[in-house]
Each structure stands twice: as structure tokens, then as C-alpha cells.
Image (tube, rainbow, N blue to C red):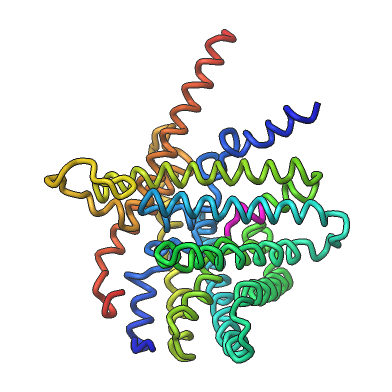
């Protein structure tokens, strides 16, 4: 009985409650590190790991953490895992570490993490809590990837460092600069809104 | 290590290197509390104060951590100090301006998870700023954050009178506004010696 519902928890974060496009959370890394698809994916995966691990721990400790100091405890748990990821990335790839810079440490201040810990992990047993967190993490990665792709293709004419349009392509530089991040995110938000609009109109049409 | 003058740092963080519009720190309150000027201003000031407190304490904490070779604890200690500073501000606002406290709501405790606050602490450490430079960096950052919040709130107040297409309403139009602001702030690049 529990298998399908656990799977639902997992899917929830990817689509129905996608942290970037539906809940509009965790905007800082979303805009700051998405200049290329590779950066976006690694940031997403790092966040997913921290999210999954800290939600698991919060859920395991949910009966022993006093209510008054819960936020502080969550933050310390999250900060611990962020430190782990920070050192791990530094050991795996120094280039990536330099590209992401202080934004890896800033995962601590990502609203998605505290939001998940408070809203879901603190009230649910470990298994669904972790699945939900990982689903959210993948949803977040997907969102980052979508933005990163568009920005890399338009701003550098490349995807995963492979040139797409040949040597005569004039890169649209503003897309890899800060304003481009805002505009691409706005574009995706509009796409999602349009999709939602279309879907509600269709279901309403069926009812009538 | 770093030879930026204080005036350079101050100008850079306020205009071309604005925390919100160029470095994407503190986006949540930027999109969340910028509906009205009357809440944007106190929110900006509260955040600027927390940034200042966090920066000063992070500077001394970092000296302590380096001395004991405990650099790996930096994230944990910084965030704990920030959480305490936010608690302080929250109690102060609740006692002195209860009306304002209600308006700011959830966004006041959320200053803890404002990337701008932690960002200042981390960036000043990464760039090896000395005490005066850190101070300039945090004050400039706070002013820059408040400025961005006020500009955004002013734009969004005007926005209520205009006819926005249904699809773009809500988050999308705010993000587009943010992009336009960011574009105009890019015009300041070069001021303060550049990044």
C-alpha cells in the first residue's frame, strides 16, 4: 500500500510542486549559477544531496528535537551537510568549485531546505520524508538545468561546451550576464503559466 | 591580499555589484516583501542592520577559527551567529513596532535564510578583506539591498495601476521587473574601479 504513495511523494516535488516554477523558492542559486548547463546540474545535485540527507536526519530526530529550538537545530543539521558537500566538490573538481564559488556554501540559506525540513520532514517518517526531499531536489535540478541550457545556448552558442551554431554565431552576451538570468526565468514562468492556463481551460471545457 | 580602497568597495557594492541585482543574493525578500513601499523600507533597514552585525561578528569569528585551524566550521558558526542576530532584531521590532511586526510577518524570521546576510560573511572571508574593508562591504551591501528593495517596491506599486496580461501576472512580472532593474544597474559598471 505504501509503495505508490511514496512514489507520489517523489513525483510531487518534480512536477506538481516544482520548487522553482511553482513555488518560486531558492531563487538565489537559480539565477546565480545557471550560466552554463554543467554548473546548473552540479549545483542541483549538490542541493539534492543536502536536501535528502538533512531531511532524513530531521525526520529521524523529529521526536527528540524540542519545538522551541527546532529552526536552529534544522539549520545546524543543514549547515553540517553543506560543509560536507563543499569539501567533497573541492576534492572532486577544483574547476567546478571555483565556478560555483561561495554559492555552494550558500546552499545553507536556500529557502527550499528549511521549508522542506519544517513543512514535511518534521512531520513524517524517514522514508517518505527522504523521498519527498529527493523529489524536490530533482525538481530543483530540472529547473536549474532548464534555465542553464537556455542561457548557455543563447549566451555562448554552446551546450555542454559543444559549439552549436558554428563560428559565425554572434553570442547574445546579455543572457550570461545577471539580467539574462531574470529574463530566462521569467520566460519559463510564463511557459508554465500558459501550460497551467491551457490545462484548466480544457478541464473546465470537459465539465461544461 | 586585497587592496581595494574603502570608497571603491562602498560604491561597487551599492551600484554595479549590487547584492540583489548583480549577485543574486537575497532574492526571496526582494520578490516577497516588495509589494508596498511602507514595508519595503523597514525590511531593507532591518536586513541592512543584520548584515552589519553578521559581518562584524563573522570577521572576529573567522580570526578565531583561523587561529584554531577550524576553518571547516565557518558555515555552521556564521549561520548560528546570524540566527541570533535575527532573533535580536525580531524581539526589538516586536516590542517597539508591533504594527510593523505584523506586516512583515514570516519574512522577518526569514532574514536568517537571506543569502545576502550569509553571503557577506562568506565573501568578505573569501576575499581576505581587513576589518575596515569588511565594514565598508557590509554597509554598502546593506544600502544596496535597501535601494533595490525600494526601487522594486516603487515599480510594483505603479504596476497595480497597469493592465498586465493574465499569463504574466504574479511572479513572472516581478522577475521581468527585476531583470530590467538589473539591466539598468549594469549601466553603472566601471564605477568604483569595477569588479
Apparent side of residue A120 relative to residue B128 in the rendered image (left or right): right
Apparent side of residue A79 relative to residue B162 in the rendered image (left or right): right
Judged by its main secondary structure, the magenta piece is helix
Looking at the rendered image, the quarter that the N terminus of chain B falls into is: bottom left
User: Up-down: is B143 above or below A165?
Assistant: below
* Residue at the spot 39% in from the left edge and 68% down from the top edge: B18
Q: Is residue A112 magenta?
A: yes
What is the total number of numbered labels drawn onto the structure image? 0
Q: Is residue B100 visible?
A: no
Looking at the image, which is closer to me, A162 or B146? A162
Q: Looking at the picture, how far across and down is residue A127, in whole percent? A: 76, 42
Q: Looking at the picture, how far across and down is residue A60, in whole percent? A: 81, 53
Q: Looking at the picture, how far across and down is residue A124, in whole percent? A: 80, 44
Q: Quadrant of residue B101?
A: bottom right
Q: Is residue A30 visible?
A: yes
Apparent side of residue B111 relative to residue A197 in the rendered image (left or right): right
Q: Is residue B83 magenta?
A: no
Q: Quadrant of residue A61?
A: bottom right
Q: Which residues are magenta?
A: A110-115
* Residue at the spot 60% in from the left edge and 55% down from the top edge: A111
Looking at the image, which is closer to me, B101 or A206? A206
Question: Of all residues shown, which one is farthest toward the front?
Answer: A92
Q: Looking at the picture, how far across and down is residue B13, in whole percent? A: 38, 75
Q: Quadrant of residue A98?
A: bottom left
Looking at the rendered image, the quarter that the C terminus of chain B falls into is: bottom left
Looking at the image, which is closer to me, B81 or B176? B81
Amino acid at each position: 500500500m505504501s509503495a505508490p504513495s511514496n512514489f507520489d511523494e517523489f513525483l510531487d516535488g518534480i512536477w506538481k510542486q516544482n520548487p522553482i516554477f511553482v513555488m518560486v523558492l531558492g531563487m538565489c542559486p537559480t539565477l546565480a549559477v545557471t550560466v552554463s548547463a554543467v554548473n546548473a546540474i552540479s549545483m542541483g545535485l549538490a542541493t539534492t544531496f543536502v536536501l535528502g540527507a538533512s531531511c532524513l536526519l530531521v525526520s529521524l530526530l523529529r521526536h527528540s528535537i524540542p519545538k522551541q529550538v527546532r529552526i536552529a537545530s534544522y539549520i545546524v543539521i543543514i549547515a553540517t551537510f553543506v560543509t560536507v558537500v563543499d569539501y567533497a566538490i573541492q576534492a572532486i573538481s577544483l574547476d567546478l568549485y571555483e565556478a560555483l564559488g561561495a554559492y555552494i556554501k550558500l546552499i545553507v540559506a536556500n529557502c527550499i531546505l528549511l521549508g522542506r525540513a519544517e513543512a514535511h520532514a518534521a512531520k513524517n517518517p524517514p522514508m517518505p520524508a527522504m523521498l519527498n526531499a529527493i523529489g524536490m531536489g530533482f525538481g530543483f535540478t530540472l529547473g536549474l538545468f532548464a534555465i542553464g541550457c537556455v542561457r548557455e545556448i543563447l549566451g555562448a552558442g554552446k551546450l555542454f561546451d559543444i559549439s552549436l551554431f558554428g563560428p559565425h554565431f554572434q553570442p547574445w552576451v546579455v543572457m550570461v550576464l545577471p539580467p539574462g538570468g531574470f529574463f530566462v526565468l521569467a520566460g519559463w514562468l510564463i511557459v508554465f503559466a500558459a501550460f497551467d492556463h491551457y490545462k484548466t481551460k480544457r478541464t473546465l471545457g470537459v465539465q461544461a | 591580499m586585497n587592496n581595494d580602497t574603502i570608497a571603491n568597495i562602498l560604491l561597487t557594492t551599492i551600484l554595479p555589484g549590487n547584492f540583489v541585482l548583480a549577485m543574486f543574493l537575497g532574492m526571496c525578500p526582494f520578490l516577497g516583501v516588495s509589494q508596498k513601499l511602507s514595508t519595503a523600507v523597514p525590511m531593507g533597514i532591518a536586513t541592512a542592520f543584520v548584515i552589519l552585525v553578521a559581518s562584524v561578528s563573522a570577521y572576529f569569528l573567522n580570526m578565531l577559527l583561523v587561529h584554531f585551524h577550524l576553518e571547516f566550521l565557518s558555515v555552521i558558526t556564521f549561520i548560528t551567529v546570524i540566527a541570533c542576530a535575527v532573533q535580536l532584531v525580531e524581539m526589538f521590532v516586536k516590542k517597539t513596532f508591533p504594527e510593523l511586526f505584523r506586516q512583515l510577518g514570516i519574512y522577518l524570521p526569514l532574514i536568517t535564510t537571506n543569502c545576502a546576510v550569509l553571503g557577506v560573511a562568506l565573501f568578505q572571508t573569501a576575499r581576505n578583506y581587513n576589518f575596515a574593508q569588511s565594514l565598508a562591504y557590509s554597509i554598502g551591501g546593506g544600502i544596496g539591498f535597501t535601494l533595490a528593495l525600494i526601487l522594486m517596491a516603487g515599480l510594483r506599486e505603479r504596476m497595480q495601476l497597469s493592465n498586465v496580461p493574465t499569463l504574466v501576472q504574479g511572479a513572472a512580472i516581478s522577475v521581468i521587473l527585476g531583470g530590467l532593474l538589473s539591466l539598468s544597474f549594469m549601466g553603472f559598471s566601471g564605477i568604483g574601479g569595477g569588479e
